[in-house]
Each structure stands twice: as C-alpha cells, then as structure tokens.
Image (cartoon, rainbow, N blue to C red):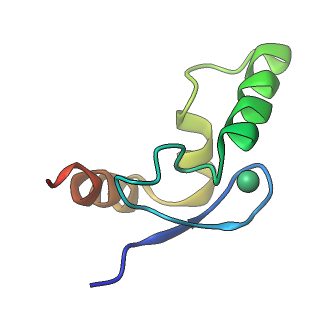
C-alpha cells in the first residue's frame, strides 16, 4: 500500500508520509527550518499545527498520524 502523500508547506514538493520521512510534512530539514522561522517571526501558536490545518481535515491528519505510528 502506497504511503499517503502530502505537500511540503514550504515548497509544495510532494512528501511521502512515512516514518522514514522524519521531516514530514516538510520535504527536508531546510524547509522545516524555514517554516519554523516563519513561526517565530509571525508569532504563530503551536509549531506543526498550522500546516496540518491548512492542508487537510483533522480526521485525515489523525489517520495519517495513525499510519505513521505503525511499526
Ligand atoms: Zn520543501
């Protein structure tokens, strides 16, 4: 079964949502740091929530997290 795919919030590159993708939902460490930088400068709430809220429903996000947590 193919891994769910999300788009990197920073550069919109497709990212396979697997446990190997340790920077998910970002494609790479750089994109994650860029987004974290935005958080700091823009005064967002909890890092990690914004991307999920913008990209998908909470239900889908929960499902993705469940799948990602499987061994
Ligand atoms: Zn990226």
Count every numbered label the image shows and give the total.
Answer: 0
Front residue of this view, candidates 30 and 54 = 30
Q: Is residue 68 above or below residue 46?
A: below
Q: Is 49 placed left or right of 28 in the picture?
A: left
Q: Is residue 35 above or below residue 69?
A: above
User: Which residue is rendered at x = 64% and y = 54% of the image?
Assistant: 27
**In the image, farthest residue toward the left:** 71
- Quadrant housing residue 41: top right
Q: Is residue 43 above or below residue 2?
A: above
Residue 26, horizontal then vertical, whole percent: 62, 49
User: Which residue is rendered at x = 70% and y = 21% of the image?
Assistant: 44
Residue 52, horizontal then vertical, whole percent: 53, 48
User: Which residue is rendered at x = 24% and y = 60% of the image?
Assistant: 67
Residue 29, horizontal then vertical, whole percent: 66, 39
Q: Is 20 placed left or right of 6 in the picture?
A: left
**In the image, farthest residue toward the bottom:** 1
Front residue of this view, candidates 34 and 56 = 34
Q: Quadrant of the N terminus?
A: bottom left
Q: Is 59 placed left or right of 48 in the picture?
A: left
Q: Is residue 51 above or below residue 66?
A: above
User: Which residue is rendered at x = 46% and y = 44% of the image?
Assistant: 22
Residue 10, horizontal then vertical, whole percent: 77, 49
Q: Is 16 placed left or right of 42 in the picture?
A: left
């Amino acid at each position: 079964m193919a891994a769910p795919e999300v788009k990197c919030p920073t550069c919109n590159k497709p990212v396979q949502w697997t446990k190997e993708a340790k920077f998910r939902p970002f494609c790479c460490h750089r994109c994650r740091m860029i987004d974290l930088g935005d958080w700091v400068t823009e005064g967002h709430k909890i890092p990690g929530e914004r991307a999920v809220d913008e990209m998908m429903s909470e239900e889908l996000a929960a499902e993705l997290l469940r799948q990602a947590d499987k061994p």
